[in-house]
Amino acid sequence: MTLKNDRLLRALRREPVDSTPVWIMRQAGRYLPEYRETRAKAGDFLTLCKTPELACEVTLQPLRRFELDAAILFSDILTIPDAMGLGLTLNEGIGPRFSRPLRSSTDVERLPEVDVITDLAYVTDAVKMIRHELHGAVPLIGFSGSPWTLATYMVEGGGSKDFRRIKSMMHDQPAVAHALLQKNTDAIINYLKAQAAAGVQSIMLFDTWGGVLSTPDYADFSLGYMAQIVAALKSDDISRDIPVTLFTKGGGLWLEKIADTGCDAVGLDWTIPLCDAYRRIGDRAALQGNMDPTVLYASDAKVQQEATRILNEIGGANGHIFNLGHGIHPQIEPNRVKTLVDTVHSVSASIRNG
Amino acid sequence: MTLKNDRLLRALRREPVDSTPVWIMRQAGRYLPEYRETRAKAGDFLTLCKTPELACEVTLQPLRRFELDAAILFSDILTIPDAMGLGLTLNEGIGPRFSRPLRSSTDVERLPEVDVITDLAYVTDAVKMIRHELHGAVPLIGFSGSPWTLATYMVEGGGSKDFRRIKSMMHDQPAVAHALLQKNTDAIINYLKAQAAAGVQSIMLFDTWGGVLSTPDYADFSLGYMAQIVAALKSDDISRDIPVTLFTKGGGLWLEKIADTGCDAVGLDWTIPLCDAYRRIGDRAALQGNMDPTVLYASDAKVQQEATRILNEIGGANGHIFNLGHGIHPQIEPNRVKTLVDTVHSVSASIRNG
C-alpha cells in the first residue's frame, strides 16, 4: 500500500522532504483525556496493552488531534520479560514491578524462551489492526526495549536509581549478565521480526538506561547487543528494508558508535545540540530529536521559539525527524502538542523554501 | 602549616606527584559503621551537620581507616536554602524536603539574604575544628552545591525525576529563574569565602543536576553562575590560591566549557573515558574521577582491575585526582574502599616508575 504521507520514511532514508516529519515519544498516553478514558475502560495498563482493539484505539487517538507524521504501536517495553513469566505489574505512580526478578545465575539459566507467535500475539494482532485502520495515512512504528534496558528491570525487579543489582551482576558475574543479555537479544530479534511481518514500517529500539554505563560497559553490555539486533533485522528478507532507529538516553558521548551499528537513525535526547550531532554523524545516519520535553509546560510562544531554534540548528538538511528528547509527560496540555507539530511543519517548510 | 601529604594540591596544580591522590565523594558516610553510630547519637542528619564536634568527628572517620589524600568537610549541599528559611528536613530513604518551596516570583523576591557569618557559623566552626584536628595530615576540601542544583531542590521542594517545576520556571519565567540563581550565586560566593577564611584548602562545586539541561540552558542557567563563583573566588585575597573543582554530573559533553571557566579541575562522572577527557582538556585543568561507584559492589579483584584500567588511561600524566564518578553508596563494604585506595596508590606509583 502506498503511504499518503511518507515523510518519516523519506527522512529516515535521508531523502528530501517538503517539511520535517514529527512524532512524539509516548504520543499515545496519559496527557490525552481520551486515552485516560480508554485506559479506565480497560481497568489497568497491562490490559490496555494486551487487548488489541484498545491498543489500536489509543494508538490512533493522537493522530485524530495532531498532524503527526507517524503512528507508534501502543505497547510497553516490558512485554518480553512479562512473556518470560517474571510477573509484571504496572501501576501509575509506582512504575513497573516484577514479582519474580532474576537474582542468580540459576534464575537466568531457567529463563524460558519466548514463543513470540503465541505469547505475544496480542502485539502482532494490534499491529495488523492498526495498519488496517490507518489506511496508509502514515507509517506505523514498532519498537522494543533494548536488551540492557530490559535486563535492568528484570534484575532490579523494577525501576532503579542506582542500578545496584544489575551492575553488581555485570561487574562480578559478567558471564551471567551476558547470558541474560543474549537471551533478551534473541527474543527481541524474534519479536521485531514478528512485528515486521505483521506490518510495522519502521522500528525503534529504546535504550532508556544505556546512559548509566561507563563507555566500555556501554559497548560491551548494551550497544553490542543492539548491533546484533540491527544486523539480524538487516539480514532478514522481511525486515531488511525497514529503517531501524537506536535511541540511548544519555548516549550523547557515543553517537558515532551508535551510527556504526548500521542503524538508519540515531535518537537524541535533549542534552546534545542537534547541530553537534549532525556534525559528528553527517550522512551516516538520520537523526531523531531533540526538544526537552519540559518545554511543553511553557507557553505556546516558548514552544514555537524552541522548536524553531532546533530546526535552525540543522537548517533543512536531509535526515531529521523531529521529536522530543524523551517521552511526553502526562501533565502536558494537549494544545501544546498541536502548537509544536504545526510549528515544526510550517517552520521547516519555510526553511526549505529559503 | 606545611601539609604532610600535599599530593592533592600538587595534582590540582598539575604538578608531578609520587602517586595519584585519591579521595571518595561521600567518604564520610553511611557505608561506615562508625558514621552510623555517630549519626544515631546525633538523632538526625541535620543535627549531625549542625553540630561542629560531630561533623568534625565524621569528617575524620574515613581517614582513620584508609590512606586517603584529602578530608572533605562533612555537610550537606542544602545548608544555604536551609539558612534562607525554606524549612529543610532530611530523611533517610525519602531524601531532602523543603516545607516552604519557592513557587512564584514573589517567593523568589522575598528570599532573604543569608548572613553566612551568623547563619552558617556551624559550618565555619566545623572547618576550623577539622583543620585543627587534622594537624596538617592532608588538605581539607570545602564545598557547595551549584546555584542551579540548589535551585532545583528549592523550587521542586525536594528531589525530582523530571524537574518539572524548576524547568517550567526556567522556560516560562526566565527572569525569575535568573533572579533565584543570582541570589544563590551571591550566597555561595560568601559561603565559600567564609569556608576559605576558616581554613579549607581546596573547594568543590557539586552541580549534581546540571546534566538534565540542554546545552544552551546549561550554559545560561548553570555554568554561567558557576563561572561567576570561580571568578569571585579568584579575585579575592583569601581564596585566590585555593584550587576550585567544578563537577557537573552528566556533563561529559561540556568539559571544554567547564574548563573555560578558569576552574582548576573538572570533575568527571563515570560515563566518559578519562583518556577522552584528558585529550579534550589537556593541561587546561586537572581531572578528577571517575570510577563507576557500583564497581565497589564487586570483588576486590574487580575493584583492582577497574582502578588499574582507569589509571592506565591517563598513564601517570600530571593533574589526575582519583575518585568515584559519584558518591559512594551506603551499602558498600568498607574493605572495598581500602582495596581501592591502596590500589590507586600502588598502581599509580608503579606506572610513574615505568
Image (cartoon, coloured by chain):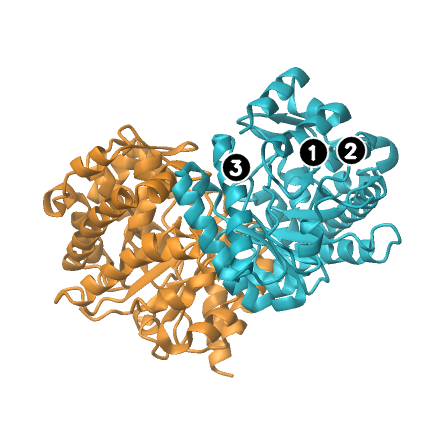
Chain colours: A cyan, B orange
Where A18 falls versus B16 (above or below)? Answer: above
Judged from the image, the secondary structure of the residue bearing numbered disc 1 is loop
Amino acid under label 2? Val
Asked whether residue B65 is in view, the answer is no
Q: Measured from the top left, where is residue B255 in percent x and y?
A: 42, 65
Determine contact: label 2, label 3, CB under 8 Å: no
How many marks the image carries: the answer is: 3
Q: In the rendered image, which quarter contains the N terminus of chain A? A: top right
Q: Where is residue B134 in the image (x, y as percent from the top left)?
A: 24, 58
Residue B259, visible in the rendered structure: yes
Q: Mark 3 points at which residue?
A: A338
Residue indicated by mark 1:
A75
Q: Residues within 10 Å of mark 2 (few under 14, many from 20)?
A: many
Residue B203 x, y percent position in the rendering: 27, 60
- Residue at image x 67%, y 50%? A8
The disc, 2 or 1, on the residue closer to the chain's N-terminal end is 1
Instruction: Work out how far the residue at label 2 is from the one at label 1, CA to CA, in angstroms.
Output: 7 Å
Q: Distance between the residues labelled 3 and 1?
A: 23 Å
Using the image, name the chain to which the residue with label 3 belongs.
A
Dot 2 and dot 1 residues touching (CB under 8 Å): yes
Q: Do labels 2 and 3 share a chain?
A: yes
The residue mark sitting in front, 2 or 3, is 3
Find the distance from the CA under tag 2 to the CA under tag 3.
28 Å
Return the disc, 3 or 1, that comes first in the chain's sequence.
1
- Residue type, label 3: Lys
